[in-house]
Amino acid sequence: MRGKMAEKSFPFQPGVMLHEAIVGAFRATGGSFEVWCAENGVAPSIARNATFGVAKGPKGRALLARLIAAAGPEVVRAGYLARFRTHAEDLRKGVA
């Protein structure tokens, strides 16, 4: 239950950082984004559309929630926040 609550209460913004955080979370836990897609009958391009926010409707949001839950909400959140902090620091330095 805690994972589902964290997933719903954390304001993930679809995009590159979220996609990378989800892919990284799968890898960190010994899985794979592509393998999860194959095992769940989801085309990787459709799953990517959900993580990037291209698929914003109910099905896309549901798929995104499934991906986050499968990858591990806490791991996704940690990866997302790390990428967010790095990006913010790059912006402060004028790198991004």
Image (cartoon, rainbow, N blue to C red):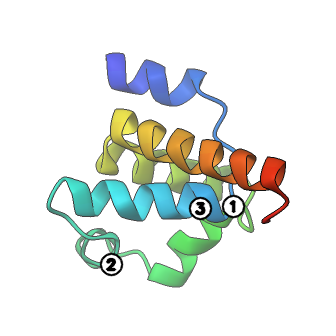
Decide which of tag 3 and tag 2 comes sooner along the chain.
2
Question: Secondary structure under badge 2?
Answer: helix
Q: Is residue 7 left or right of residue 24?
A: right
Location of mark 1 (residue): 15
Q: Is residue 66 left or right of residue 13?
A: left
Going by the picture, which residue comes out furthest to the front? 93
Decide which of tag 3 and tag 1 comes sooner along the chain.
1
Q: Which mark is residue 34?
A: 2
* Residue 49 point in image, percent of width and height: 64, 72
Q: Which mark is residue 56?
A: none
Q: Residue at x 19, y 64 (%)?
A: 31
Location of mark 3 (residue): 51
Q: Residue at x 73, y 46 (%)?
A: 88
Question: Secondary structure under badge 3?
Answer: helix
Q: Residue at x 32, y 78 (%)?
A: 34
The residues tagged by marks 3 and 2 sit, at their Cα atoms, a distance apart of 13 Å
Q: Is residue 31 left or right of residue 62?
A: left
* Residue 65 point in image, percent of width and height: 50, 45
Going by the picture, which residue comes out furthest to the left? 30
Along the viewing direction, whichever of 41 and 87 lies nearer the viewer: 87
The residues tagged by marks 3 and 1 sit, at their Cα atoms, a distance apart of 6 Å
Name which residue type carries label 1: Gly
Decide which of tag 2 and tag 1 comes sooner along the chain.
1
Name which residue type carries label 3: Thr
